[in-house]
Image (spheres, helix red, strand yellow):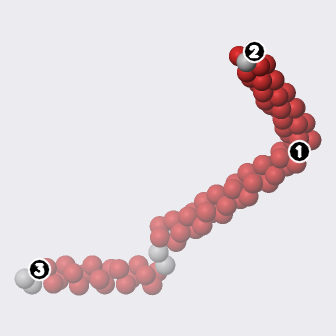
C-alpha cells in the first residue's frame, strides 16, 4: 500500500518535471523566433520617445526665447507699468 503511494508520487513528480522541461524548451524556441521582431519594436518605441523628448525640448527652448527677449511693445508696456507702480508707491 505504501509502496503504491510512493510509486504514484514518483510518477506524478516525473510528469510535472517533463512538462516543465517541455514548456521551458517551447518558451526558448518562441523567444528565439520572435527576437528580431522584439528588437525592432523596442527600437521603434525608443525612437518615438526620443522624438517626443526632442519636440518637448524644442518647445521649451522656443518658450524660453520668447520670454527672454520681449518685443519692443512689450518692453515699453513693462516700463509704463513699473513707472506707474513707483509713482503709486511714492504717493502713499
Q: Which label's residue is closer to the chain start, 2 or 1?
A: 2
* Element marked by disc 2: helix
**15 and 89: which is toward the camera:** 15
Q: Are marks 2 and 1 in contact (CB under 8 Å)?
A: no
Question: 9 or 45: nearer the eye?
Answer: 9
Within 10 Å of disc 3 (Cα), the crowding (few <14, some 14-19, many 20+) is few
How far, Cα to Cα, is label 2 from label 1? Answer: 47 Å
Q: Rounded to the nearest whole Å, what is the CA distance between mark 3 and mark 1?
A: 76 Å
In the image shown, does 20 or 92 lie closer to the viewer?
A: 20
Residue at image mark 1: 34
Label disc, if present, on residue 3 of the rendered structure: 2
Q: Name the residue under label 3.
A: 90
Residue 7 can be seen, yes or no: yes
Image quadrant occupied by the N terminus: top right
Marks 3 and 2 sit apart, C-alpha to C-alpha, by 106 Å
Residue 35 left/right relative to 64: right
Residue 22 placed where, x, y %? 87, 32
Q: Residue at x 11, y 80 (%)?
A: 90
Give the quadrant of the C terminus: bottom left
Amino acid at each position: 500500500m505504501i509502496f503504491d503511494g510512493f510509486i504514484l508520487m514518483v510518477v506524478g513528480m516525473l510528469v510535472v518535471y517533463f512538462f516543465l522541461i517541455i514548456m521551458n524548451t517551447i518558451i526558448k524556441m518562441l523567444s528565439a523566433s520572435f527576437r528580431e521582431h522584439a528588437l525592432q519594436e523596442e527600437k521603434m518605441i525608443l525612437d518615438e520617445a526620443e522624438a517626443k523628448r526632442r519636440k518637448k525640448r524644442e518647445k521649451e527652448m522656443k518658450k524660453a526665447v520668447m520670454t527672454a527677449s520681449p518685443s519692443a511693445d512689450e518692453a515699453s508696456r513693462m516700463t509704463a507699468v513699473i513707472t506707474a507702480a513707483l509713482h503709486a508707491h511714492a504717493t502713499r
